Amino acid sequence: MYIIGLTGGIGSGKTMASGAFTHLGVPVIDLDEIAKNLTKKGSKGYNEIVKYFGQHYLNDSGDIDRRKLRADIFLMPKCKNRIESILHPLIYQECLAAIKENDGAAYIVIVIPLLFETNTYQVIINENLLIDCSEELQLKRVINRDLIEKKLAMKIINSQMKRQDKLNKAENIINNEASKDILEKNILYYHENLLKKLGVEI
Ligand code: ATP
């Protein structure tokens, strides 16, 4: 099974890029999606978070307030460590199960936001693909999408690996500073080249 690790900073366009792979029929495993499912009411991650933090992260309907969780992960290192030690092993197990489910595919894409920051996933992928854009554009996109304050968005961007360090580690780079159409064309180009490299007939 050939595995692409798709990564990029917050708001760089990972989800948009992975949507283009899905459109091409490529199986996509998104670690953020797995994390979302694991924090749904009644799931393993949810139960563990409630066990440790009590009502702290719950809203009125008893669901985990993901915005609050996300903000604390970036603003409070102690909470970050605890939340990550609960969720990361569960996410990894789900990811391995999803890889097995897609056994017959020519290749699969795993969206791994912190690929370069941790070792865990670097050892299971065959090549990485960085979705890249300027930090100014990341900031603009995140503020528009999440309706968060500029200060928090900047803090999140600054807490992540610097753009140039990611570019240095990347084996493949797709720039996402233009339109969605251009992003999709670039993904198609990458996809066709990869299939050729893998000896798969198009
Ligand atoms: P996160 O790390 O927060 O999950 P992400 O890397 O998955 O972010 P996206 O959600 O794909 O980023 O993109 C961030 C925002 O920017 C979204 O609202 C998306 O619609 C928009 N966006 C991404 N790429 C483009 C583009 N090429 N043209 C216009 N808007 C874009």
Image (cartoon, rainbow, N blue to C red):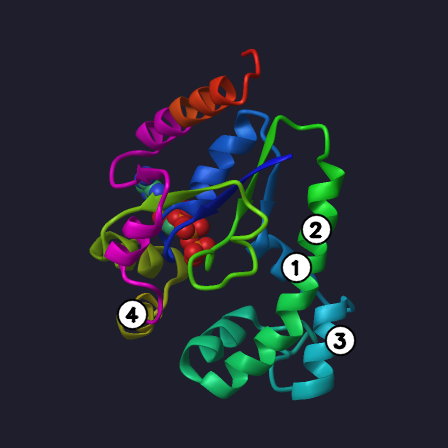
Furthest residue in direction front, as rendered? 123
Sort mark 1 into few (<14), some (14-19) or many (20+) by Cα contacts within 10 Å.
Answer: some
Residue drawn at 42 percent across, 58 percent down:
116
Q: Quadrant of the C terminus?
A: top right
The stretch of residues the image draws in magenta is 159-187
Front one among 101 and 51: 101
The residue to which callout 1 is attached is 92
> What is the distance, in whole Å, between disc 3 and disc 4 at their CAs?
31 Å
Task: Let me know if residue 92 is in the magenta part.
Answer: no
The residue to which callout 2 is attached is 96
> What is the distance, in whole Å, between disc 4 and disc 1 at their CAs?
25 Å
Give the x, y percent position of residue 106. 62, 26
Give the x, y percent position of residue 45. 70, 70
The residue to which callout 4 is attached is 158
Is the shortest distance between ligand 1 and the CB of mark 1 under 8 Å? no
Amino acid on which disc 4 is placed: Asn
> What is the distance, in whole Å, between disc 2 and disc 3 at their CAs?
21 Å
Q: Quadrant of the N terminus?
A: top right
> What is the distance, in whole Å, between disc 2 and disc 1 at their CAs?
6 Å
Q: Assign a secondary structure to mark 2.
A: helix
Horizontal arrangement in the rendering, residue 74 relative to residue 132 (left or right): right
First along the sequence among labels 3 and 4: 3
Amino acid on which disc 1 is placed: Tyr
First along the sequence among labels 1 and 3: 3
Residue drawn at 40 percent across, 61 percent down:
146
Sort mark 3 into few (<14), some (14-19) or many (20+) by Cα contacts within 10 Å.
Answer: some
Horizontal arrangement in the rendering, residue 26 relative to residue 71 (left or right): right
Residue drawn at 25 percent across, 41 percent down:
177
User: What mark, if any, has residue 161 been given in the picture?
Assistant: none
Furthest residue in direction top, as rendered? 201
User: What mark, if any, has residue 47 been given in the picture?
Assistant: 3
First along the sequence among labels 4 and 2: 2
